[in-house]
Image (cartoon, helix red, strand yellow):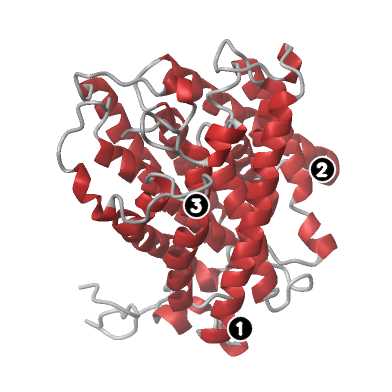
C-alpha cells in the first residue's frame, strides 16, 4: 500500500497503476536526494580541520552504505509496515527485504519499491547529519554500528509516527493519524530528530581537545560553498518529491524551497553584518541551509509569502543559536544543533501559524485557523526532540562503554585521516628523485 508522506489529502491513488510522469518525477527526486550525500560530505568536509577531512566524508558515505542496506532489509517495514500497536512502530517483518514489492501494485500511483527507496534516502541523510555534531573525535567502526542501531531504534519509529498514513486496512503512525500534525518532508523525522540526536551524542562523547580555546575554523570554505550548492540542488528532490507526483503541490513545494533558502541566506548575512561587521561566505552557506531546513516540514503547507518569512526567521534565529554551544559548553562541532534542531523547530512550529488552505488541508493561526494546529505542531516537535535525545544518549552511552565511541586523545591530536584511514586529504610534499612515483596512503591509486 502506497502512503503519502505529506498529508492524507495528497495521497491520490488510481486503479490503473503507476503513472509514468509521477514515476519519472519520483525517480528523479530520489536521485536528487542521493546527490545530497556528496553535498553533505563536501559541506561537512570543508568545515572540519584539514587533518580530518577524509574521516568526515567517510562518515557521511559510511552512513549511506549502512542505512540503505538496513532500510531495505527491515527499516522500511518498521517505518511503513502495518502498525503493531498504539501507532508507535510498524510490523518489522512485513516488507522484509522488499521482496513483496517486486510486482506492480495496481493501487499505487508510483511503484511501491521506488517509494520505499525514496524514503530510505531520507533516513540516509538524517543519520549522516548527526556525524557533524561529533566530528573530529569519533571511531569510524563504532560510528557504523551506531548508524545501524539508530536507524532501527530511532529513525524508523519516528518516520512511522509522522510519515505513515492510514489507508484502507492499513494502520499508520500516531502523529499523522491520531494527532494530526503536519510535516511535509521531515521537520520532525529528519531535522529535529538529527539535531536532538547530535546534541545527545556530542554530550556523551564530550568536547574536542582544545574546544573553546583553540581556533577550529573551517579549513576550506570553497568546499563548504560547493557542498551547500549541492545540498540546495538535492533539496528540491527532498521537498518537491514528497508530493509523490508531478503536480501542482510539487510545484508549490519547489517554489517555497527556493524562496526559503534565499531568505535564510539573506537573514543570516544581515545578522552577521550587524553583529560582526562582515557578511561571510560561511554565513551565506549556513544561512541557505537554515532556510532549507525550516521549509522542509512546511513547503507543502504554506504560501510563497509564508515561505519567505519562514526562511528569514530561520536564518536569523539559527545565526544566533549556533553561538549557544560556547555559552552552554557542549561541543556541537559543525552546528547540527544550531541549524538542524533549531531550524527544524522553527519550520515545524510555524506551520501552526502560516498554514493555508489554499495549499493544504488546514489554516494556521494567522489565516483564521485558531490555535489547534499550532498545539499539534508543538506536541509533535516536543515529543520528537525528547524521544530522539533520550534514545540517542542511551545508544551512544552503551557504545562508548562497550566498543568505545571516542578515539584516543593521541589519535585525535594527530588527526583522524592518517590514524584511522592511513590517508591524507592534501599531499603537500614534493616527490623527490627522477622517475619517482608519489605515494598516496591507503588503497590502490594506480
Label 1–label 2 contact, CB within 8 A? no
Which one is in front, 162 or 399? Answer: 162
Image position of 145 with respect to 189: above or below: below
Q: CA distance from mark 3 to mark 1?
A: 37 Å
Nearest to the observer: residue 278 or residue 437 = 278
Which residue is pictured at 67% across the width and 51% down the height? 385
Look at mark 1 in the image and give the residue it sits on.
Answer: 413
Name the residue beneath numbered marker 2.
277
Q: What kind of element bears circle 2?
A: loop
For residue 255, side relative to residue 210 (left or right): left
Q: Quadrant of the N terminus?
A: top left
Measuring from the top left, give residue 234's x and y in whole percent. Answer: 42, 39
Q: Which type of secondary structure does the marked residue at label 3 adopt?
A: helix
Dot 2: within a 10 Å radius of its alpha carbon, few (fewer than 14), some, or many (20 or more) residues? few
Q: Are marks 3 and 2 in contact (CB under 8 Å)?
A: no
Q: Indicate which disc, 3 or 2, sits on the residue closer to the N terminus.
A: 3
| Quarter where residue 295 is shown | top right
Residue 14: quadrant of the picture? top left
Residue drawn at x 58%, y 40% is: 187
**Residue 157 got which mark?**
3
Where's residue 422, x and y in %? 39, 82
Q: Residue at x 74, y 52 (%)?
A: 322
Earlier sequence position, callout 3 versus callout 1: 3
Cβ atoms at labels 3 and 1 below 8 Å apart: no
Amino acid at each position: 500500500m502506497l502512503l503519502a508522506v505529506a498529508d492524507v489529502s495528497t495521497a491520490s491513488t488510481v486503479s490503473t497503476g503507476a503513472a509514468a510522469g509521477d514515476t519519472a518525477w519520483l525517480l528523479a527526486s530520489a536521485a536528487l536526494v542521493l546527490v545530497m550525500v556528496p553535498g553533505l560530505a563536501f559541506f561537512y568536509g570543508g568545515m572540519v580541520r584539514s587533518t580530518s577531512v577524509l574521516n568526515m566524508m567517510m562518515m557521511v558515505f559510511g552512513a549511506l552504505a549502512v542505512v540503505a542496506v538496513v532500510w531495505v532489509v527491515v527499516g522500511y517495514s518498521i517505518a511503513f509496515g502495518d502498525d503493531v500497536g498504539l501507532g508507535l512502530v510498524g510490523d518489522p517483518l512485513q516488507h522484509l527485504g522488499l521482496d513483496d514489492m517486486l510486482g506492480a501494485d495496481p493501487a499505487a500511483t508510483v511503484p511501491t519499491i521506488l517509494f520505499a527507496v525514496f524514503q530510505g534516502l531520507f533516513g540516509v541523510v538524517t543519520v549522516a547529519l548527526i556525524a557533524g555534531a561529533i566530528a573530529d573525535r569519533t571511531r569510524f567502526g563504532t560510528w557504523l554500528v551506531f548508524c545501524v542501531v539508530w536507524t532501527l531504534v530511532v529513525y524508523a519509529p519516528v518516520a512511522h509516527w509522522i510519515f505513515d498514513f492510514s489507508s484502507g486496512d492499513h494502520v499508520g503512525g500516531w502523529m499523522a493519524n491520531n494527532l494530526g500534525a503536519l510535516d511535509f518532508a521531515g521537520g520532525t523525522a529528519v531535522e529535529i530528530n538529527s539535531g536532538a540526536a547530535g546534541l545527545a551524542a556530542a554530550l556523551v562523547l564530550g568536547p574536542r581537545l582544545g574546544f573553546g580555546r583553540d581556533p577550529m575554523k573551517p579549513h576550506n570554505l570553497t568546499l563548504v560553498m560547493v557542498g551547500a550548492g549541492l545540498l540546495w540542488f538535492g533539496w528540491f528532490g527532498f521537498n518537491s518529491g514528497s508530493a509523490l507526483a508531478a503536480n501542482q503541490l510539487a510545484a508549490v513545494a519547489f517554489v517555497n524551497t527556493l524562496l526559503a533558502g534565499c531568505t535564510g541566506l539573506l537573514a543570516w548575512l544581515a545578522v552577521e553584518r550587524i553583529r560582526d561587521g562582515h557578511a561571510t561566505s560561511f554565513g551565506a552557506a549556513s544561512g541557505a541551509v537554515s532556510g532549507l531546513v525550516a521549509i522542509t516540514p512546511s513547503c507543502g503547507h504554506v504560501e510563497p509569502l509564508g515561505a519567505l518569512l519562514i526562511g528569514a526567521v530561520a536564518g536569523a534565529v539559527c545565526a544566533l543559536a549556533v553561538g549557544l554551544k560556547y555559552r552552554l559548553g557542549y561541543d556541537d562541532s559543525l552546528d547540527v544543533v544550531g541549524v538542524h534542531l533549531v531550524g527544524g523547530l522553527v519550520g515545524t512550529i510555524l506551520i501552526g501559524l502560516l498554514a493555508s488552505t489554499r495549499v493544504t488541508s488546514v489554516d494556521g493561526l494567522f489565516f483564521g485557523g485558531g490555535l489547534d494546529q499550532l498545539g499539534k505542531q508543538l506536541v509533535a516537535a516536543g515529543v520528537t526532540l525528547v524521544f530522539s535525545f533520550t534514545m540517542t544518549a542511551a545508544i551512544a552511552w552503551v557504545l562508548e562503554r562497550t566498543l568505545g565511541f571516542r578515539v584516543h586523545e593521541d589519535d585525535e591530536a594527530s588527526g583522524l585521516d592518517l590514524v584511522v584511514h592511513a590517508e591524507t586529504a592534501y599531499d603537500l610534499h614534493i616527490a623527490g628523485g627522477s622517475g619517482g612515483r608519489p605515494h598516496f596512503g591507503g588503497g590502490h591509486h594506480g
